[in-house]
Image (tube, helix red, strand yellow):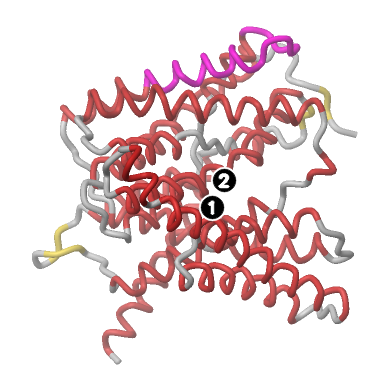
């Protein structure tokens, strides 16, 4: 009983910290997630009787990571609608894909070179994670401003989030199946188990989704239907994993199906899932700081800064390459290049990977957390001088 009360006390403290940081961030216009990460890192480095000040059982941490992962994956993938695809969104999707490919090629190589990461699969996981953007700070600060740059950044975040939460786990599956050997013969031998993960994952998500939507159309309940959505997403993940499939792919498939089928109450259901997933943000960002032991050394700091600068160069090249022919000025392209803030999607994947105890993952987790901090700080600074990059900041919405 004492242990349970202690865990509940820890949870209450973290949630209270989250509420207080929200108040502080709004008052001083500081990103809330930056404060949460720093608080988590600070608590994680406090030594208390030979251990951490706040500790949670592995089962609890794993359960929270899976729940957060499922909700974020479903929320992000359910917002993609094929009906809304137009010329503007196609260019945004093209940028997301180009940035992802450039990262997988160049950032993977730079990471292995600068930090000596031996596993190409782990370097690929990091590179795919860093393709995610979430300029929530920019968009929230300019929510009353209508401008194509902000609209483009918002849409890019919406489109690349499903890729960011899915591809690292596909690469992880490849790593496990190929046993860290990128050999054609090994790939051919393991092709069937790999294909099984894809087929079972997609099949589980589509099957559970179809069953849920059928019941939704026949008997919608204001109270029970939102809960049914969350339960279905978790069920899709669990079934896929138990059948040796990819659980994240199952939830992604279900989310995409949800976003493209007709339901009168779709908006209410999606908003409920979004509120539920957002409530997990406080726990995720603080707990990342707790479980990822960030090296506080000059050597790591210098090398990570160098890698981050190279990463910004990759981002800039991706924008120049993919936005040819679009009506963006050079300053606007630089502004978009510098706005690479990482949000809850990247955070929840890092949190999930941290709880899997994968050999050699330590450097990747440290770099992911460091890049999250760098990107949030950089976006906050660029935000304050946005008018330098965007001369016509936009027209006020009517």
Instruction: Please report contact status of discs 1 and 2: CB closer than 8 Å, yes or no.
Output: yes
Q: Is residue 312 magenta?
A: yes
Q: Which residue does the image show at 68% across and 69% down from the upper left?
A: 207
By secondary structure, the bulk of the magenta-drawn segment is best described as helix
State the quadrant of the N terminus.
Answer: bottom left
Tell me the tag on residue 92.
none
State the quadrant of the C terminus.
Answer: top right
Q: Which residue does the image show at 55% across and 38% down from the upper left?
A: 29
Task: Name the image quarter holding residue 298.
Answer: top left
Q: In the shown orientation, is residue 206 left or right of residue 367?
A: right
Q: Is residue 357 magenta?
A: no
Q: In the shown orientation, is residue 353 left or right of residue 143?
A: left
Q: Please provide percent x and percent y for residue 147.
A: 76, 24
The residue where tag 2 is placed is 26
Q: Which residue does the image show at 81% across and 74% down from the upper left?
A: 214
Question: Dot 1: what SS?
Answer: helix
Q: Which residues are magenta?
A: 309-330
Q: Please provide percent x and percent y for residue 342.
A: 49, 39
3D distance between C-alphas at marks 1 and 2: 5 Å
Q: In this picture, is 124 found above or below 63? A: above
**Nearer to the camera, 389 or 76:** 76
Q: Please provide percent x and percent y for residue 292.
A: 28, 51
Tell me the tag on residue 23.
1
Q: Residues within 10 Å of mark 2 (few under 14, many from 20)?
A: few
Say whether residue 280 is visible. yes
Task: Name the image quarter holding residue 96.
Answer: top right
Task: Name the image quarter holding residue 261.
Answer: bottom right
Q: Residues within 10 Å of mark 1 (few under 14, many from 20)?
A: few
């Amino acid at each position: 009983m004492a242990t349970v009360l202690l865990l509940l006390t820890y949870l209450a403290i973290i949630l209270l910290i989250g509420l207080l940081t929200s108040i502080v961030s709004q008052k001083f216009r500081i990103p809330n997630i930056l404060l949460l990460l720093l608080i988590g890192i600070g608590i994680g480095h406090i030594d208390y009787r030979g251990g951490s000040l706040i500790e949670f059982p592995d089962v609890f941490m794993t359960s929270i990571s899976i729940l957060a992962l499922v909700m974020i994956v479903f929320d992000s993938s359910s917002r993609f609608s094929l009906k809304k695809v137009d010329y503007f969104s196609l260019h945004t999707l093209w940028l997301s894909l180009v940035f992802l490919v450039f990262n997988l090629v160049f950032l993977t190589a730079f990471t292995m070179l600068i930090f000596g990461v031996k596993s190409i699969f782990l370097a690929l996981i990091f590179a795919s994670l860093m393709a995610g953007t979430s300029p929530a700070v920019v968009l929230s600060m300019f929510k009353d401003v209508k401008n194509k740059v902000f609209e483009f950044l918002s849409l890019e975040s919406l489109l690349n989030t499903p890729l960011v939460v899915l591809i690292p786990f596909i690469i992880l599956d490849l790593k496990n199946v190929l046993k860290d050997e990128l050999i054609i013969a090994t790939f051919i031998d393991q092709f069937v188990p790999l294909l099984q993960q894809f087929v079972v994952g997609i099949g589980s998500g589509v099957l559970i989704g179809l069953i849920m939507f059928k019941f939704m159309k026949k008997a919608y309940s204001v109270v029970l239907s939102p809960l049914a959505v969350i339960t279905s997403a978790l069920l899709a993940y669990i079934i896929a994993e138990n059948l040796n499939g990819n659980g994240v792919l199952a939830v992604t498939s279900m989310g995409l199906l949800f976003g493209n089928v007709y339901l009168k109450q779709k908006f209410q259901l999606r908003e409920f899932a979004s509120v539920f997933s957002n409530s997990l943000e406080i726990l995720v960002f603080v707990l990342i700081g707790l479980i990822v032991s960030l090296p506080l050394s000059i050597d790591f700091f210098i090398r990570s800064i160098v890698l981050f600068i190279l990463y910004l160069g990759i981002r800039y090249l991706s924008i120049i390459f993919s936005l040819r022919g679009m009506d963006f000025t050079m300053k606007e392209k630089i502004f978009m290049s510098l706005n690479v803030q990482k949000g809850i999607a990247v955070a929840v994947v890092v949190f999930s990977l941290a709880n899997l105890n994968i050999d050699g993952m330590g450097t990747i987790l440290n770099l992911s957390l460091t890049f999250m901090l760098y990107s949030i700080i950089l976006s906050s600074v660029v935000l304050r001088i946005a008018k330098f990059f965007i001369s016509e900041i936009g027209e006020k919405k009517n």
